[in-house]
Image (cartoon, rainbow, N blue to C red):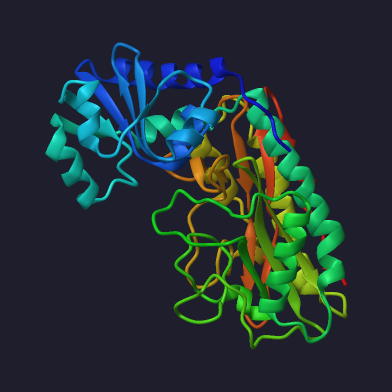
Amino acid sequence: MFLEIAPKEFAGRIRSVITRLADADPNFDTALIVGRVNQYYLTGTMQDALLILKRDGSAYYFVRKSFERAQAECPLDIVYPMSSYRDILGTLAPEFGTTYLDTDVVTYALMERLRKYFKMDTIRSLDKILLTVRSIKSEQELALISHSGAQQRHLLEDIVPTLLREGISEAEFQGELFSALMNLGHQGLCRFSMFQTEMAMGQFGFGDNSMCPTNFDGPGGMRGMSAASPAAGSQDRRLKKGDLVFVDVGFGTDGYHSDKTQVYSFGVAPDAKTLQIHRACIDIESRCAELLVAGAIPSKIYAEIMSTLPEILSVGFMGYGQSVRFLGHGIGLCVDEIPVIARGFDEPLQENMVFALEPKCGIPGVGTVGVEDSYIVRSGYSECITGGGRDIITV
């Protein structure tokens, strides 16, 4: 699926970032945007480049490689060639004043290169403003996310059950799952905001492999191939009768993600307690979705749900052993965006924000159960675009 976004939408995004910066800081002069996902959001292309925004509303996209591709993909007349940052000085003066950067991706080495050519009186973080602007989606963005959600639902409800068979390894399953994703139009990767997060598709595991601790900030787990590759399927763990199969993958279309989790039971139906815990998670998702409306406060949603957890979720909820402290997260160009349904997020939700709600629970010796679905925030309700929580599917 490809939607051509109008030039005025990119211009509006740039204008929104500049306006927010100017309103927040009377000394703001320049914003430097290095991150390629942020570049894509503001220009329609992602290159080895530097996007410069000025307080007067002007924008300059200096591209090292590929200038030709940037010209073809960016609909705005802001693209300039460069071989090094020195070339920028032929167009702009080096005095950048109070400068904002997307500091989540700017390394110390890159900062030293920037300082070599530009005078920045004060350096401040642009990250929260950029993510806040990105959190409210346009109709075209919502169309892409909704398409991802529909394809993801089809994948998890209809296709994955056909891939599960006695003796298949997690690694083999990962390969076949990736092939199925690509056949449905998946973009080939899942992007994350968290620094140094590496994950090809998401998390999945057979049995209690889905509870193995990882450095990924999520309620599920994954053993992986080795310590060097914890986000890939194990070559040794093979599917056997009675295993739970936990599949938590993202789906991306033209940069925009949806997120959904489905649990399966191979060969036999899950036992009554496992099913009861899973259904309690479905109920938590439903309760969260009812509260996920324009004007609601994320931290209050979190507090209300966590203060009324049923006894059956008192152990292992949101991760066994080391639980995470959220119930859902924003989603868009990255799988993990703001706002988050957690403490500290006190700004009201706005229409056209998109969230993944993911109540899950680890059961010792069994695995991770629970659900995850993606929702668009509307006025007075939330719209599920991935089908909603389902019972464990017996295969």
Q: Is residue 268 above or below residue 337?
A: below
Question: What percent of the width, then of the height, locates residue 184?
Answer: 78, 51
Residue 307 in view (yes/no): no
Question: Splitting the image into 4 quarters, where does residue 257 fall?
Answer: top right
Image quarter (top left, top right, bottom left or bottom right) of the N terminus:
top right
- Taking the image as shown, residue 136 lies to the left or right of residue 171, namely left
Question: Which residue is rendered at x = 47% and y = 39% of the image?
Answer: 46
Q: Is residue 91 above or below residue 248?
A: above
Question: Splitting the image into 4 quarters, where does residue 138 fall?
Answer: top right
Residue 303 in view (yes/no): yes
Question: Which residue is rendered at x = 34% and y = 46% of the image?
Answer: 104
Question: What percent of the width, then of the height, locates residue 323?
Answer: 50, 64
Question: What percent of the width, then of the height, locates residue 68?
Answer: 47, 34
- Taking the image as shown, residue 249 lies to the left or right of residue 110, namely right
For this rendering, which residue is in front, 369 or 146?
146
Question: Which residue is rendered at x = 75% and y = 75% of the image?
Answer: 244
